[in-house]
Image: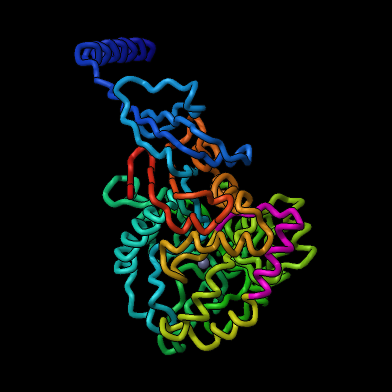
Amino acid sequence: MRMYSTMLLAVLAAATTLSEACFAETPAPVAVKVTVVRAGKLVDVISGRLLSDQIIVIENERIKSVGPADTAAIPAGAEVIDLSKATVLPGLIDVHTHLTSDPTIHGYKSLGVSNIRAALYGARAARVTLEAGFTSVRNVGADGFGDVALRDAINDGEIPGPRMLVSAIPLGIKGGHCDENLLPADFDFTAKGVADGPWPARAKVREMVKYGADLIKICASGGVLSKGDTPGAQQYTLEEMKAIVEEAHKLGRKVAAHAHGTSSIRDAILAGVDSIEHASLVDEEGIKLARERGTFFSMDIYNDDYILSEGEKVGFLPESLAKERAIGQLQRDNFRKAWKGGVRMAFGTDAGVYPHGDNARQFAYMVQYGMTPMDAIRAATINSAELMGWKDSVGSVSAGKFADLIAVDGDPLQDVTRLTKVAFVMKGGQVVKKQ
Ligand SMILES: [Zn+2]
């Protein structure tokens, strides 16, 4: 045995020497692409200040340095991108998208769309979203793992799109918001994410992780766009949500909870979820709990406009329109209360309910309901990066992070609607859009 071990070690040592020798004979050329961006103005989301005349040096896909133009040296041979007349910001982040959902197909019309067709639609939505300046998104709900395929195709460079974290299929109770309730019992159809009870719910978490989920999405309450349920009514129990959160966290996945109703928001926070989506009917207790526990809110306060103006045309059920009319304004008012109450805000819009690429329209509402433009921009950059677990790689223009940059004309800190007209987008050092 000992003899065998010695021989094995000798063979391994020889193999190592051989591979080192091969490596030494053919040194791999390490090409470093250096790009320099001249920024007339730069929104520094970390200090909360607007900086003038900055030089951003990029090596391959990451930012090497950021500094004032009068002291920074431009490396020889660098490609220079002149944005000296524009305002540069970090790439924006939307933590609540449905890239595989077509906003013109809702309600019964959606039953005719296969999961494969939805994934192909998602390829278009991913490009449109990236070109609108959103260089990272969290996709929180897609049927049939279309979001996993989309993320992988983007990461493999096959199609353009934002960096993605995906939840795969959302978990929920039978007959709840995350089930499919459009068909009568004759069809005997239940959505793939349905799991009732703590252990079936744990098993469903494991299944989503097995097939590629980066995070877990659950439906803690009823919803607006589903049939036969009530947004204010709790669906998952505290016991079920505790089991889901424990299982997901154990496997290194965060949990996003769809929760409109007051008690569902409270119980989801108590169960330890990482973000509350919608948070429409939050009360003082929910706000206090979220503040104390650092739970992020992701409140989609733009899309009511689209649902109510386009709703009938795109197939929303009459009951969905009624539910939206009942809680849309309450959600906006509660956004103001939650922000004033010290809740950490991410930027989530429910893109896919409304047209992809219009994500930045929500900024104006966040400002109208109590944020400064800088607060709103921070929600869509450093805050959302933190919620995604990516604060060391995206969310600010800082040395060491991915070179995900956008630029707009004028000053978005004076007029936040400037962010709806992004003129330049760079993702990982590659120019995606330049006007
Ligand atoms: Zn959603």
The percent position of residue 411, horizontal first and vertical second, equals 53, 49
The answer to whether 301 is drawn above or below residue 321 in the figure is above
- Residue name at image x 40 percent, y 68 percent: 101
- Residue name at image x 41 percent, y 56 percent: 132
Tell me where residue 114 sits by quadrant: bottom left
The answer to whether 258 is drawn above or below residue 23 in the figure is below
- Residue name at image x 42 percent, y 68 percent: 355
Residue 169 visible in image: no
Q: Is residue 179 left or right of residue 383?
A: left
Magenta region includes residue 344: yes
Q: Is residue 279 left or right of residue 321?
A: right
Closest to the observer, 403 or 95: 403
Closest to the observer, 406 or 222: 406
Kindly report the secondary structure that dominates the magenta region of the rendered protein. helix
The percent position of residue 96, horizontal first and vertical second, equals 51, 60
Q: Is residue 383 left or right of residue 213?
A: right
Magenta region includes residue 346: yes
- Residue name at image x 79 percent, y 64 percent: 284
The answer to whether 115 is drawn above or below residue 166 in the figure is below
Q: Is residue 89 left or right of residue 126?
A: right
The answer to whether 219 is drawn above or below residue 246 in the figure is below
Tell me where residue 326 sits by quadrant: bottom right
Q: What's the magenta region?
A: 329-347
